[in-house]
């Protein structure tokens, strides 16, 4: 699906009457008090978030790469706010959820390396609120991630890691009929037997210890929904699922939050590290340029598609419709 088609699909949510009706049904299903009143209050905000996101993304695609991270980051935040209104009708209930909820070094060290740069998660802010409300994940303390950790979780960058860094951070896996099939080479990568790997993945993907047919892991719809999945990663170009190649990189982080953290840091670099940023953009001095430019193109395509899929699958919002990634 082209990006123009994606925004055309969003037009279904540009009717206040339809949006208010959908929100009211969702709130009733969730047994939220005063569903009609809250749906009426949130209808316009929901539409405005989507329209603002569309403007950010479209202007970002037409803008120089130098300012794309800033536009895509704010486009993503607007889409997440619209998604939040489907489960949190009182958003924003306090000013604490308005901050970004992430920090990064504003002054980079000498001999700065983008791949080694870090972002830290704060206890409050939009990131934490989205993590809890949309994905059911509460952050534990001041978690931090390097840019390399985050980029290596973007499956469309797997070929770039192999070509530029001679690394294979992700492994292709076979998913058919809601089953993930395990192989001996996969088990060897994790230094486990297939049986032990099955237990490990059952627990981490399904969050419970269950057994299925030997050598397979049973997946629920949320496990293979790219919006919610926090362990399996989906390559929208290949239509292929991936797992981390190394057990150490098996972290629970939905891809949208990965994009959030990367775009946040890149937007901060855009604003505060102008000299380093333009040196990279104009001289292509290291591999960071290739990874960043490819990542921005991936964000432009995947973020609106993932959020549209979420909204279309929300109860009362045409749950039979699907987005072709």
Image (cartoon, rainbow, N blue to C red):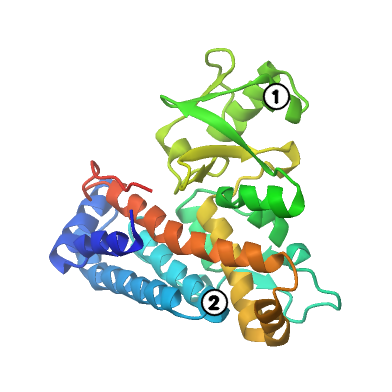
Indicate the quadrant where residue 20 lies.
Answer: bottom left
Local packing at callout 1 (Cα closer than 10 Å; few below 14, some 14-19, many 20+) is few
Residue 158 as seen in the image, left or right of residue 306: right
The residue labelled by disc 1 is 185
Q: Residue furthest right?
A: 110
Local packing at callout 2 (Cα closer than 10 Å; few below 14, some 14-19, many 20+) is some
Residue 227, given in percent of the width and then of the height, sits at: 44, 49
The residue labelled by disc 2 is 65
Residue 44, given in percent of the width and then of the height, sits at: 24, 73
* Camera-side residue of 174 and 17: 174
Q: Residue at x 59, y 76 (%)?
A: 267
* Placement of 218 over or under 313, stated as above or below: above
* Placement of 155 over or under 146, stated as above or below: above
Q: Residue at x 37, y 59 (%)?
A: 83
Residue 151 as seen in the image, left or right of residue 174: right
Residue 102 as seen in the image, left or right of residue 225: right
Confirm whether residue 178 shows in the render: yes
* Camera-side residue of 126 and 168: 168
Confirm whether residue 142 shows in the render: no
Of callouts 2 and 1, the N-terminal one: 2
Q: Secondary structure at mark 2?
A: helix
Q: Residue at x 75, y 23 (%)?
A: 192
* Placement of 191 over or under 214, stated as above or below: below
- Tell me how far mark 2 sits from mark 1, CA to CA: 40 Å
């Amino acid at each position: 699906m082209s990006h123009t088609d994606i925004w055309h699909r969003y037009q279904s949510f540009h009717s206040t009457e339809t949006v208010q009706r959908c929100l009211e049904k969702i709130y009733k299903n969730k047994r939220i008090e005063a569903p009609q009143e809250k749906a009426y209050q949130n209808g316009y905000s929901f539409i405005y978030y989507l329209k603002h996101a569309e403007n950010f993304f479209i202007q970002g695609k037409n803008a120089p790469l130098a300012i794309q991270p800033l536009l895509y980051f704010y486009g993503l935040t607007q889409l997440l706010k619209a998604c939040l209104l489907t489960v949190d009708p009182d958003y924003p209930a306090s000013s604490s959820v308005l901050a970004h909820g992430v920090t990064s070094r504003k002054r980079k060290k000498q001999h700065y390396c983008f791949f080694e740069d870090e972002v830290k998660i704060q206890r409050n802010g939009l990131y934490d609120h989205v993590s809890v409300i949309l994905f059911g994940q509460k952050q534990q303390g001041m978690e931090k991630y390097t840019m390399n950790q985050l980029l290596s979780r973007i499956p469309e960058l797997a070929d770039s890691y192999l070509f530029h860094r001679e690394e294979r951070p992700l492994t292709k896996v076979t998913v058919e009929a809601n089953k993930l099939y395990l192989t001996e080479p996969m088990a060897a990568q994790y230094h486990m037997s297939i049986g032990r790997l099955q237990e490990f993945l059952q627990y981490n993907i399904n969050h419970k210890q269950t057994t299925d047919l030997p050598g397979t892991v049973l997946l629920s719809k949320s496990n293979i929904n790219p919006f919610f999945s926090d362990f399996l990663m989906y390559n929208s170009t290949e239509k292929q699922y991936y797992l981390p190649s190394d057990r150490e990189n098996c972290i629970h982080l939905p891809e949208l939050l990965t994009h959030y953290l990367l775009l946040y840091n890149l937007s901060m670099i855009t604003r505060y590290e102008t000299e380093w940023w333009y040196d990279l953009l104009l001289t292509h001095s290291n591999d960071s340029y290739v990874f960043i430019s490819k990542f921005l193109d991936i964000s432009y395509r995947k973020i609106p598609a993932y959020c549209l899929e979420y909204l279309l699958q929300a109860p009362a919002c045409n749950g039979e419709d699907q987005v072709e990634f």
